[in-house]
Amino acid sequence: MEPNERLDDMPLTDKDKFSKGLMTLLTPVIEEMDSRIVAVKASQLELNKEIERLLAELQLFVDATEQPSIQPSIQKLISATKKLATTNVTLKTVHDRVEKMYVQLGKSKETAT
């Protein structure tokens, strides 16, 4: 390679073309997935706060009155909270994987150029 020759000016191999094309194709998809995962996580946190608020209100009602048959509803809310926590863990795992893919694609792009 001559000192004045830039990497961008060098001919691309088939592997480089494939890497660049794959990067061009996948980057917007990964960015979209990442933004949607972040939005879902925010929504899940908001939902979790609302469930906690409802649980607190129901608990006040239970403590202040005779025991009506709302205990099953409280149990359902507690179960939903546990499922929500599990979903949040899964979303975090997916988000972390998407981030790793994005980093790997960035590294691939650097080596391809």
Image: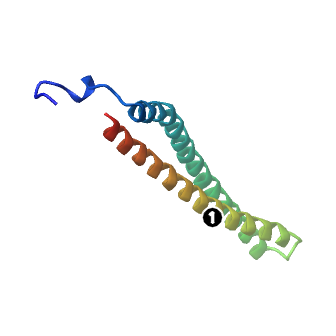
Query: For the residue labelled by badge 1, is the local secondary structure a helix, a strand or a loop?
Result: helix
Which one is in front, 51 or 16?
16
Figure disc tally: 1
> x, y (%) of residue 53?
65, 61
Which residue does the numbered mark 1 point to in the structure image?
A: 85
Side of 38 where 20 appears, left or right? left
Tell me the amino acid under the disc marked 1.
Answer: Ala
Name the residue at 68% across, 68% down: 82
- Classify 96 as above or below 31: below
> x, y (%) of residue 22?
48, 34
> x, y (%) of residue 60?
71, 70
Name the residue at 85% across, 76% down: 67
Q: How is the image coloured?
A: rainbow
Which one is in front, 100 or 18?
18
Decide: few, some or many residues near mark 1? Use Cα within 10 Å; few <14, some 14-19, many ≥20: some
Which one is in front, 1 or 27?
1
- Classify 72 as above or below 6: below
Which residue extends farthest left? 3
Write down the quadrant of residue 69 in the picture.
Answer: bottom right
Name the residue at 56% across, 47% down: 37
Which one is in front, 80 or 59?
80
- Classify 31 as above or below 85: above
Write down the quadrant of residue 11 in the picture.
Answer: top left
- The image quadrant where one finds the N terminus is top left
